[in-house]
C-alpha cells in the first residue's frame, strides 16, 4: 500500500530537492522511516536510527540494503523538516484514503476533537509584555489568560482545558471526521485550542466533504456541538446534524424523531478509537514539535498511518 501511495506522489517529491550538489535522503525513504516511527512508538530520531542500524525488517521497509550506512540522526531531522508542510501531509493522507475504496461510508460520519499537549512547560507561559529573560517566575495568585500571556517556548500553543475540573495545559486541538462503517478517518486537521475551534474545524471539514459528495450526508457529534450557529450552518451545507441533544439546544424533534438519529449516536464511539491509537501508539499524547504548522503535519500524517494499519485488516475481514 505504501508503494502505491508514494508512487502516486512522485511528482510532488520532484520539487523538494535540487538537482545540484550532493544527493540527500530520498523523500520516499524519509516518509517510510517516519511511518515506522509512528507504527512502533519510536520516541526519537536518534532511537529510530539505532533501530534501522540492526533491525532488518526496518531496513527492508525503508529500502536500505543490508550493508547500506544509516543516516545520522541530525541529518535525518534536518531533511525531515523539508517534508513538514501541511500540503504534503494532506496529499499523503488523500492517497492513503484512496486505498480504502469500498471500505468507507459515503453518507454517515462522526466528528470530534481531542487535546494535544504542546511541547512547552507551564512556566514558559509568561505575560506578553514581560521582557525579563529566563523562566521560573512566581505565578501564585496571577490570572493566566491567553489574551495577556503566551508561551516563550511555543507561542502558538494556548492554555486550554476541555472540561471543568481538569487542569489547563498548553495545547493544540486535533480534529477528525470519521466515517461510520468501519471507523476510518475521512478528514483531519489541527487548530489552536479555544472554545470555538472544534465547531469551526468541523464546519471546514464538512464543507470540503460536501464538495466531493453528491448526496446528502449525516454528521454525528457530542453535546458540545449542539449550538444554533453550528446546527444552522451544517444544514446550509446540506448535512443533517445528528448531534447529541442538550437542554435548550438547537436539535429538536425534527431531527431526533428519525431512526437514523439514534443509529448515528450509537456510532459515536468510533471517533474515539483513532484518538486512543494516536495517543497511545503514535506520538500525539505530548507532541514533540513546536508551532501549529508542524503539529498539523504530524497529526494528519499520523491519521494516515492509522488508516494504513486499519485498511489491510478490514480487507481481510471482508475477503
Image (cartoon, grey):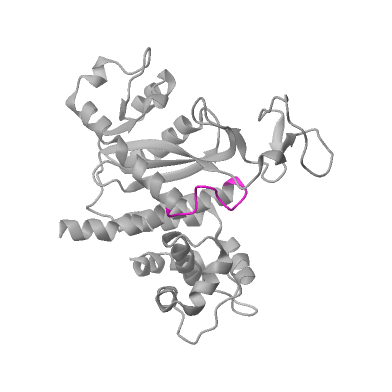
Q: Is residue 186 above or below residue 25?
A: above
User: Looking at the image, which residue is at 38% across and 22% down?
Assistant: 226
From the viewer's perspective, tell me whether residue 125 is left or right of residue 187: right
| Range drawn in magenta | 281-292
From the viewer's perspective, tell me whether residue 54 is left or right of residue 151: left
Residue 74, position as x, y percentages in the image: 64, 69
User: Looking at the image, which residue is at 74% across and 35% down?
Assistant: 126
Q: Is residue 290 magenta?
A: yes
From the viewer's perspective, tell me whether residue 172 is left or right of residue 20: left
> Dividing the image into 4 quarters, which one contains the N terminus?
bottom left
Residue 69, position as x, y percentages in the image: 55, 83
Q: Can residue 16 be seen?
A: no
Residue 165, position as x, y percentages in the image: 52, 26
Q: Main secondary structure of the magenta part?
A: loop
Q: Is residue 238 magenta?
A: no
Residue 149, position as x, y percentages in the image: 71, 32
Q: Quick one: 220 or 246, which is closer to the camera?
A: 246
Quadrant in the rendering for residue 8: bottom left
Quadrant in the rendering for residue 146: top right
> Dividing the image into 4 quarters, which one contains the C terminus?
bottom left
Q: Quick one: 22 or 279, which is closer to the camera?
A: 279
User: Looking at the image, which residue is at 65% across and 45% down?
Assistant: 120
User: Looking at the image, which residue is at 41% across and 39% down?
Assistant: 205
Judged from this view, the residue extending furthest toward the top is: 248
Amino acid at each position: 500500500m505504501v508503494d502505491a501511495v508514494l508512487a502516486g506522489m512522485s511528482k510532488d517529491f520532484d520539487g523538494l530537492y535540487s538537482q545540484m550538489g550532493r544527493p540527500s535522503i530520498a523523500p520516499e525513504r524519509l516518509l517510510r522511516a517516519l511511518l515506522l516511527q509512528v507504527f512502533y512508538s519510536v520516541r526519537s530520531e536518534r532511537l529510530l536510527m539505532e533501530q534501522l542500524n540492526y533491525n532488518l525488517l526496518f531496513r527492508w521497509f525503508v529500502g536500505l540494503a543490508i550493508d547500506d550506512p544509516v543516516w545520522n540522526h541530525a541529518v535525518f531531522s534536518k531533511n525531515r523538516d523539508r517534508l513538514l508542510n501541511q500540503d504534503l501531509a494532506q496529499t499523503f493522507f488523500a492517497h492513503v484514503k484512496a486505498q480504502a475504496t469500498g471500505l468507507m461510508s459515503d453518507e454517515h460520519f462522526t466528528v470530534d476533537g481531542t487535546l494535544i499537549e504542546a511541547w512547552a512547560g507551564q512556566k514558559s507561559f509568561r505575560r506578553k509584555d514581560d521582557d525579563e529573560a529566563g523562566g521560573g517566575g512566581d505565578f501564585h495568585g496571577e490570572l493566566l489568560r491567553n489574551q495577556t500571556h503566551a508561551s516563550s517556548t511555543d507561542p502558538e500553543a494556548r492554555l486550554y482545558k476541555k472540561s471543568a475540573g481538569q487542569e489547563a495545559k498548553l495545547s493544540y486541538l486535533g480534529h477528525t471526521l470519521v466515517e461510520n462503517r468501519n471507523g476510518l478517518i475521512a478528514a483531519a486537521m489541527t487548530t489552536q485550542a479555544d472554545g470555538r475551534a472544534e465547531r469551526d474545524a468541523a464546519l471546514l471539514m464538512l464543507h470540503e466533504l460536501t464538495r466531493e459528495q453528491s448526496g446528502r450526508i449525516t454528521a454525528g457529534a457530542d453535546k458540545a456541538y449542539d449550538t444554533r450557529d453550528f446546527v444552522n450552518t451544517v444544514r446550509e451545507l446540506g448535512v443533517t446534524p445528528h448531534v447529541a441533544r442538550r437542554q435548550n439546544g438547537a436539535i429538536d424533534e425534527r431531527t431526533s424523531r428519525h431512526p437514523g438519529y439514534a443509529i448515528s449516536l450509537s456510532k459515536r464511539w468510533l471517533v474515539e478509537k483513532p484518538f486512543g491509537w494516536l495517543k497511545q501508539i503514535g506520538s500525539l499524547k505530548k507532541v514533540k514539535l513546536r508551532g501549529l504548522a508542524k503539529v498539523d503535519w504530524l497529526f494528519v500524517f499520523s491519521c494516515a498511518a492509522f488508516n494504513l494499519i486499519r485498511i489491510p485488516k478490514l480487507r481481510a475481514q471482508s475477503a
